[in-house]
Image: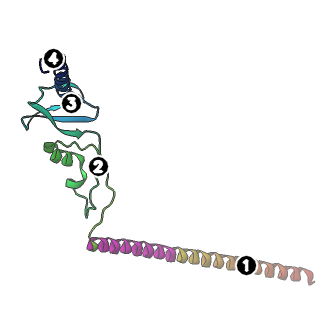
Amino acid sequence: MLDNPLIWAIVTAFLGVVVVRKAVIIVRQGFEYTLERFGRYSATLRPGFHFIIPFMNRVGHKMNMMERVADVPSQEVISKDNALLSVVDGATTPWGVKVTRIEIKDISPPMDLVESMARQMKAEREKRANILEAEGLRQAQILRSEGETRAAGLEAEERKEAAFRDAEARERLVEASP
Protein backbone atom coordinates (compact mmCIF):
# COMPACT_ATOMS: atom_id res chain seq x y z
CA MET A 1 0.00 0.00 0.00
CA LEU A 2 2.88 2.43 0.70
CA ASP A 3 4.37 1.39 -2.65
CA ASN A 4 1.54 3.09 -4.47
CA PRO A 5 2.92 6.17 -6.27
CA LEU A 6 -0.47 7.88 -6.07
CA ILE A 7 -0.35 7.94 -2.27
CA TRP A 8 3.19 9.32 -2.36
CA ALA A 9 2.07 12.00 -4.83
CA ILE A 10 -0.84 13.00 -2.60
CA VAL A 11 1.36 13.08 0.53
CA THR A 12 4.04 15.07 -1.32
CA ALA A 13 1.45 17.52 -2.70
CA PHE A 14 -0.06 17.93 0.78
CA LEU A 15 3.35 18.58 2.33
CA GLY A 16 4.16 21.00 -0.51
CA VAL A 17 0.95 22.95 0.15
CA VAL A 18 1.75 23.06 3.89
CA VAL A 19 5.32 24.26 3.23
CA VAL A 20 4.17 26.92 0.72
CA ARG A 21 1.43 28.02 3.13
CA LYS A 22 4.01 28.39 5.92
CA ALA A 23 6.53 30.13 3.60
CA VAL A 24 4.21 32.84 2.20
CA ILE A 25 3.21 35.67 4.55
CA ILE A 26 0.92 38.51 3.47
CA VAL A 27 0.97 41.52 5.82
CA ARG A 28 -2.11 43.76 5.50
CA GLN A 29 -1.93 47.54 5.26
CA GLY A 30 -1.75 49.18 8.70
CA PHE A 31 -0.05 46.19 10.34
CA GLU A 32 3.51 45.04 10.94
CA TYR A 33 4.52 41.51 11.93
CA THR A 34 7.59 40.49 13.91
CA LEU A 35 9.58 37.62 12.45
CA GLU A 36 11.13 35.19 14.92
CA ARG A 37 13.83 32.65 14.13
CA PHE A 38 13.71 29.79 16.64
CA GLY A 39 11.71 31.99 19.03
CA ARG A 40 14.06 34.98 18.88
CA TYR A 41 13.25 38.29 17.13
CA SER A 42 15.02 38.64 13.78
CA ALA A 43 13.10 41.20 11.66
CA THR A 44 9.94 43.23 11.18
CA LEU A 45 7.73 42.48 8.18
CA ARG A 46 6.09 45.58 6.70
CA PRO A 47 2.82 45.49 4.69
CA GLY A 48 3.07 43.40 1.55
CA PHE A 49 4.02 39.90 0.32
CA HIS A 50 6.89 38.05 2.05
CA PHE A 51 8.64 34.66 1.80
CA ILE A 52 10.10 33.08 4.94
CA ILE A 53 11.91 29.83 5.67
CA PRO A 54 9.19 27.58 7.14
CA PHE A 55 9.74 25.76 10.44
CA MET A 56 12.81 27.95 11.18
CA ASN A 57 11.04 31.30 11.00
CA ARG A 58 7.57 32.14 12.21
CA VAL A 59 5.40 35.22 12.78
CA GLY A 60 5.68 36.37 16.40
CA HIS A 61 3.37 39.33 17.00
CA LYS A 62 0.91 41.05 14.70
CA MET A 63 1.03 44.76 15.55
CA ASN A 64 -1.65 47.24 14.54
CA MET A 65 0.18 50.38 13.35
CA MET A 66 -2.92 52.51 12.76
CA GLU A 67 -3.40 55.63 14.85
CA ARG A 68 -4.96 54.93 18.23
CA VAL A 69 -6.30 57.30 20.86
CA ALA A 70 -4.87 56.83 24.33
CA ASP A 71 -6.76 58.40 27.20
CA VAL A 72 -4.54 60.16 29.70
CA PRO A 73 -5.76 60.47 33.30
CA SER A 74 -6.71 63.90 34.61
CA GLN A 75 -3.72 66.17 35.28
CA GLU A 76 -3.30 68.58 38.18
CA VAL A 77 -1.22 71.13 36.29
CA ILE A 78 -0.02 71.82 32.78
CA SER A 79 3.74 71.67 32.46
CA LYS A 80 6.27 71.38 29.67
CA ASP A 81 6.50 67.62 30.30
CA ASN A 82 2.81 66.81 29.88
CA ALA A 83 1.73 69.36 27.21
CA LEU A 84 4.50 69.71 24.63
CA LEU A 85 4.33 67.20 21.81
CA SER A 86 8.07 66.99 21.16
CA VAL A 87 8.88 66.10 24.80
CA VAL A 88 6.31 63.28 24.95
CA ASP A 89 7.24 61.98 21.48
CA GLY A 90 10.94 61.97 22.41
CA ALA A 91 10.19 59.98 25.55
CA THR A 92 8.11 57.35 23.71
CA THR A 93 10.28 56.91 20.60
CA PRO A 94 12.63 54.29 22.20
CA TRP A 95 9.53 52.15 22.84
CA GLY A 96 8.46 52.29 19.19
CA VAL A 97 5.52 54.61 19.85
CA LYS A 98 5.00 57.67 17.64
CA VAL A 99 2.97 60.49 19.24
CA THR A 100 1.30 62.60 16.54
CA ARG A 101 -1.06 64.81 18.53
CA ILE A 102 -1.87 65.75 22.13
CA GLU A 103 -5.20 67.26 23.13
CA ILE A 104 -5.68 68.60 26.65
CA LYS A 105 -9.17 67.66 27.80
CA ASP A 106 -9.40 67.90 31.58
CA ILE A 107 -7.22 69.55 34.16
CA SER A 108 -7.97 69.21 37.87
CA PRO A 109 -5.76 71.69 39.72
CA PRO A 110 -5.24 71.33 43.49
CA MET A 111 -7.91 72.93 45.71
CA ASP A 112 -5.51 75.53 47.17
CA LEU A 113 -4.71 76.71 43.63
CA VAL A 114 -8.41 76.89 42.74
CA GLU A 115 -9.13 78.86 45.92
CA SER A 116 -6.21 81.20 45.23
CA MET A 117 -7.46 81.81 41.70
CA ALA A 118 -10.99 82.46 43.04
CA ARG A 119 -9.64 85.00 45.57
CA GLN A 120 -7.64 86.73 42.83
CA MET A 121 -10.70 86.91 40.55
CA LYS A 122 -12.82 88.26 43.44
CA ALA A 123 -10.18 90.92 44.18
CA GLU A 124 -10.11 91.91 40.50
CA ARG A 125 -13.92 92.21 40.41
CA GLU A 126 -13.93 94.32 43.61
CA LYS A 127 -11.18 96.53 42.22
CA ARG A 128 -13.15 97.09 39.01
CA ALA A 129 -16.32 97.78 41.02
CA ASN A 130 -14.49 100.35 43.20
CA ILE A 131 -13.02 102.04 40.12
CA LEU A 132 -16.44 102.18 38.45
CA GLU A 133 -18.04 103.51 41.64
CA ALA A 134 -15.35 106.21 42.02
CA GLU A 135 -15.71 107.10 38.34
CA GLY A 136 -19.48 107.35 38.81
CA LEU A 137 -19.11 109.63 41.87
CA ARG A 138 -16.61 111.81 39.98
CA GLN A 139 -18.95 112.08 37.00
CA ALA A 140 -21.88 112.90 39.32
CA GLN A 141 -19.86 115.68 41.01
CA ILE A 142 -18.84 117.10 37.65
CA LEU A 143 -22.43 117.06 36.41
CA ARG A 144 -23.70 118.55 39.70
CA SER A 145 -21.12 121.36 39.53
CA GLU A 146 -21.91 122.01 35.87
CA GLY A 147 -25.61 122.12 36.78
CA GLU A 148 -24.96 124.53 39.63
CA THR A 149 -22.82 126.73 37.38
CA ARG A 150 -25.50 126.74 34.68
CA ALA A 151 -28.22 127.46 37.29
CA ALA A 152 -26.17 130.36 38.68
CA GLY A 153 -25.66 131.69 35.15
CA LEU A 154 -29.36 131.42 34.35
CA GLU A 155 -30.23 133.07 37.67
CA ALA A 156 -27.84 135.94 36.91
CA GLU A 157 -29.33 136.21 33.43
CA GLU A 158 -32.84 136.36 34.92
CA ARG A 159 -31.75 139.05 37.42
CA LYS A 160 -30.17 141.04 34.62
CA GLU A 161 -33.35 140.70 32.52
CA ALA A 162 -35.49 141.69 35.52
CA ALA A 163 -33.27 144.71 36.21
CA PHE A 164 -33.47 145.67 32.52
CA ARG A 165 -37.28 145.46 32.61
CA ASP A 166 -37.41 147.47 35.85
CA ALA A 167 -35.20 150.13 34.28
CA GLU A 168 -37.35 150.14 31.16
CA ALA A 169 -40.52 150.43 33.24
CA ARG A 170 -39.02 153.39 35.14
CA GLU A 171 -38.06 155.07 31.90
CA ARG A 172 -41.61 154.76 30.62
CA LEU A 173 -42.90 156.11 33.87
CA VAL A 174 -40.55 159.07 33.63
CA GLU A 175 -41.56 159.63 30.02
CA ALA A 176 -45.22 159.31 30.85
CA SER A 177 -45.05 161.86 33.73
CA PRO A 178 -45.02 165.43 32.50
Give the residue at mark 1.
158
Give the residue at mark 3.
46
Residue at 25%, 62% (x, y): give it: 77
Which sits earlier in the primary sequence, circle 1 or circle 4?
Answer: 4
Which sits earlier in the primary sequence, circle 3 or circle 2?
Answer: 3
Residue at 18%, 20% (x, y): give it: 7
| Secondary structure beneath label 3 | loop
Give the residue at mark 2.
102
What is the x, y in percent for residue 165? 80, 79
Secondary structure mainly formed by the magenta segment: helix
Which sits earlier in the primary sequence, circle 4 or circle 3?
Answer: 4
* Count of picture labels: 4
The tag on residue 31 is none
Q: Distance between the residues labelled 2 and 1?
A: 78 Å
What is the x, y in percent for residue 5? 16, 15
Which sits earlier in the primary sequence, circle 3 or circle 1?
Answer: 3
The C terminus sits in image quarter: bottom right
Q: How far apart are marks 2 and 4 (CA)?
A: 68 Å
- How is the model colour-coded? rainbow
Residue at 29%, 54% (x, y): give it: 71
Residue pushed farthest front? 1
Position of residue 176 relative to residue 25, above or below, is below
Residue pushed farthest top? 5
